[in-house]
Amino acid sequence: MSPEYVRPYVKAQKNDERDAEAIAEAATRPTMRFVELKSEAQLEVQSLRRVRGRLVTERTALINQLRALLLERGITAPQGRRKLERLLPEILADDHNDLGSRLRRLIEDMRSEWPGLDERITAFDGELAERARADEATRQLVTIPGVGVLTAAALVAAVGNAGTFSRGRDLAAWLGLAPR
């Protein structure tokens, strides 16, 4: 049950016992609406997306820190991870910049960490794409212009059976989309 439907049945100050009593009372009401439980597949996709998101955040933090270390020494790197990736060997090979030997080793260490993150993110992308090919709802969503595999998988994992919504407007409101 959604918490806002249980709230009117809580009699006094909130605690575990009163919450349980309110849930039991609300469940007996004939008009109560229940939330559909997520399937194991939905939970797995959501977990995959969360772990992938954490890895992307780690990679972004690593790249930003590399860029900041270089900027402290007066070396500016262009935006974009591929541009920085191509520029790093040139920077490390240049003996006339203000990078000390310890900082060069530190940057090299951070640079060696980067491909591992890329590989893990790519592996999760591949697994999500494979799951998307196996799921009919995800395949249909991918045919919509602007909707990719990651977005379609996220939507199917979050919503599940869209038939639980009486109209498209209810689904849009649940997603947080509002009309113009």
Image (cartoon, rainbow, N blue to C red):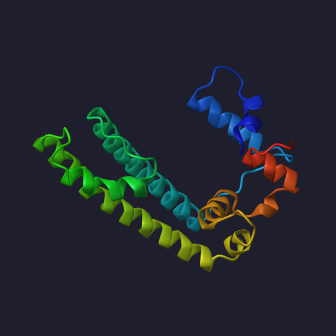
Q: Residue 87, position in %: x, y?
A: 33, 54
Q: Is residue 76 left or right of residue 92?
A: right
Nearest to the observer: residue 114 or residue 90 = 90
Q: Is residue 108 left or right of residue 114?
A: left
Q: Is residue 120 above or below residue 111?
A: below
Q: Is 71 rendered above or below residue 49?
A: above
Which sits in the foreground, 61 or 179? 61
Q: Name the residue at 45% across, 51% down.
A: 80
Q: Is residue 153 left or right of residue 104?
A: right
Taking depth in this image into account, of 6 and 97 the one nearest to the observer is 97
Which residue: 19% across, 38% down?
Answer: 98
Q: Is residue 169 left or right of residue 108?
A: right
Residue 135, image x and y in percent?
64, 76
- Residue 113 position, x and y percent, is 27, 56
In percent of the image, x 45 and y 47: which residue is there?
79
**Hey, which residue is sitting farthest top in the picture?**
13
Q: Which quadrant holds the C terminus?
A: top right
Name the quadrant of the N terminus.
top right
In the rendered image, the residue lying farthest to the left is 101
Q: Residue furthest front?
A: 96
Residue at horizontal 42 percent and vertical 69 percent from the top: 123
Quadrant of the rendered image containing residue 3: top right
